[in-house]
Amino acid sequence: MASAPAPAAAESPERAPDYCDLDPFSLTAAGHDFTFYPHGQDRLKALVALIESAQTSLAVFYYLFDSDTSGTMVRDALVAAARRGVKVDLIVDDFGNDAGAEFFDPLVEAGGSFAIFSPKWGKRYLVRNHQKFTIADEARVMTGGANVSDHYFAIPAENGWCDLSVLIEGPVAAQFTRWFGLLQSWVANEVQGRTRKLRALRDIVKDWDGGDGPVRLLVGGPLVRQGHWAWVLRKDLVGATRLDTVSAYFSPPRSFRRLFARIGRRGQARMIMAGKSDIAAAIDMARLLYGKLLRARVKIFEFAICKLHMKLIVVDDVAFVGSANLDKRSFRINVELMVRIEDAAVAAAMRNLIDHMAEASEPITPAWYARHSTFLNRLRWRVAYWLSLADYRISKAGTV
């Protein structure tokens, strides 16, 4: 078993521009092999290599897929796989399909399939299928926060997204395959007009059983509570004494904020938030919530080396890695997935990664908050918070 690297030496704020993502690191735990990719270019190479390694099937689902250099590289790898006889199925969320449907015509011509999640107007419009994963041969899966676009593979010096992907080989890959099949059937029924109800999608999420082992595929979806990934997270938080998180968008329900605060009071809680984002309001909506967390002794940092997109939660000896942010859309509206890994070594490796990021982040102290939480700032933060609940398209009007 290859161990995770120790975090880099502490950097002073003056050295922050020298920040580099950690190299890939691998662990074997709970009958699974994990390789984590904090570095953007490593993520791209690993994704293309996974596609090129497929011999029988590729099941691919992305929230966002762009037609830029990286998107073309990944699409062409999928086309090449289809031409060599691999069964290739690709689904992209309608909101995140920046490439356009015609961009995927070469894949269809090569014998693969392409579909769009929720292409029709209606109640489903506000629901984003925010997942990101690629399954090769029903045995190996790559998932995490990264979409397919140059932004998610660029280095920090080029203001790329700071993100995390993981390549997993082991029994949980079969759960991913089963989950993809359910989503594919729902999309096919939508396209053929056999169902127009959001209820069918909710039922898929509500009835999902990710098992009860140390490595589980948890999902979430619109207006589903029990069984939701956040339902499981809540159970882990109730008695926890240590919490570490990295979240690009932070606006969790009040009940979860209370749980975070309780951990801060009785143990240790550390949260890294975005200091840079594609959505300016994302920073404002998080800052609105800092005050009570700071009073509960939660340590807060803002990562401003580059845009933050990572979704990582570590509760005691349990790590959650996947597509979900700690915001209300991920808790209550979007279709999301999180892989729950119960293993002390994996949790320690994730905390090493968070240590590395915290050393290059700005600590948000009570004194900092007192200086910045003026009446006008708090008013702006509150407006951003409520607008973000409706639709990120609205908030994005304030992008810088």
Image (cartoon, rainbow, N blue to C red):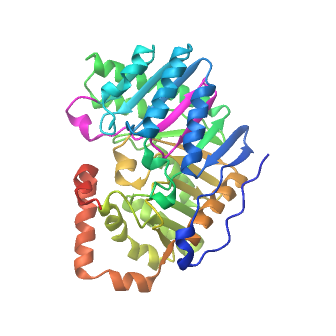
Q: From this viewpoint, which residue is outermost toward the left?
A: 122
| Extreme residue in the right direction | 1
Tell me where the magenta segment starts and ends, as one range. 119-147
Q: Is residue 134 above or below residue 399?
A: above
The quadrant in which the N terminus is found is: top right
* 115 magenta-colored: no
Q: Measuring from the top left, give residue 170's x and y in whole percent.
A: 68, 33
Q: Position of residue 34 (x, y in %)?
A: 67, 42
Q: At which x and y percent is residue 225?
A: 40, 44
Which residue is drawn at the image coordinates 60% and 32% (left, top)? 50
Q: Is residue 118 above or below residue 226?
A: above
Q: Position of residue 299 (x, y in %)?
A: 52, 74
Point 54% across, 75% down: residue: 265
**The magenta stretch spans residue 145:** yes
Q: For this view, does 395 lie left or right of residue 294? A: left
Q: Is residue 58 above or below residue 228?
A: above
Q: Quadrant of residue 183?
A: top left
